[in-house]
Amino acid sequence: MRVAISQSNYIPWKGYFDIIASVDRFILYDDMQFTRRDWRNRNKIKTPQGLVWLSVPVLTKSKYFQSIKDTQIDGSAWAAKHWRTIETNYARAPNFEMMADIFRSTYEGEIPEFLSDLNSQLIRKICNFLNINTIIESSADYALVEGKSERLLDLCKQVDADAYISGPSAQGYLDTALFSSAGVDVEWFDYSGYPVYNQLWGDFEHGVSILDLIANTGLKSPNYMKNV
């Protein structure tokens, strides 16, 4: 059993979905602290004026611990603005309508109260389009122990995982010896070597929301990923 554990992100980039596709089970780790100016509630798209952030407004309590799963979205007026921005900048993309079929209903429908639910909804829709059949769950469904590495390892144990797949940024804190002693291999996901595709608006950018890839390549999106 291969497992990855990661905070939910708002309309994530292609690498996020490659990690999901590379494992049997993906746990949305939204019991973690919500961090400002991070990928939890925002992501980038391309425009004729350069990269633009789409940010979901949220309610925060600056003096207290606030988990991602307990972070509330501040209203729904932003949704129409996000969709107008997406539509304006991707209407010329060859597969815009295919991308719109995935995303439009979220922006025009009832917006969830909590950020985690919005992120999960979008992530699952994108996985469905990409035919990623990985089991996606929430850390809220599991017992959680103390300790950064200890908690991740214990989640792996609860699902009988023998391999934990992580992004390279965790190399600075993850206690790999702890995992090794428990018989769980740690693998660092490699984000390098992605092929480029025909992209609107200037120089190629890898680190944008996956909606860019879908709008530009449609059903060929997996050809520009690693594990899909």
Image: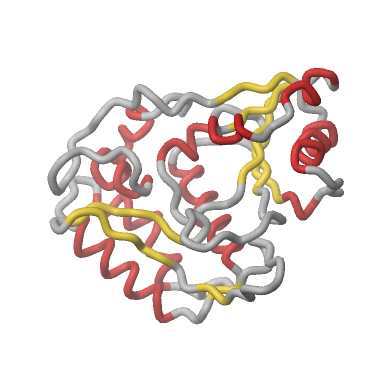
* Left or right, 131 with reference to 150: left
Query: Is 134 rendered above or below residue 2?
Result: below
Query: Is 79 rendered above or below residue 171?
Result: below
* Left or right, 71 with reference to 148: left
* Residue at the spot 84% in from the left edge and 19% down from the top edge: 181
Position in image of residue 147 (x %, y %): 81, 43
* Residue at the spot 20% in from the left edge and 64% down from the top edge: 88
In the foreground, 42 or 65: 65
* Left or right, 180 with reference to 112: right
In the foreground, 52 or 107: 52
In the foreground, 117 or 73: 73
**Labels in figure, total:** 0
Position in image of residue 121 (x %, y %): 55, 57
Query: Is 36 rendered above or below residue 164?
Result: below
**Toward which corner of the image does residue 85 lie, by quadrant?**
bottom left
Colour style of the rendered protein structure: secondary structure
* Residue at the spot 21% in from the left edge and 38% down from the top edge: 204
Position in image of residue 103 (x %, y %): 39, 59
Quadrant of the snapshot with the N terminus: top right
**Toward which corner of the image does residue 173 lie, by quadrant?**
top right
* Residue at the spot 32% in from the left edge and 44% down from the top edge: 214
In the foreground, 88 or 105: 88
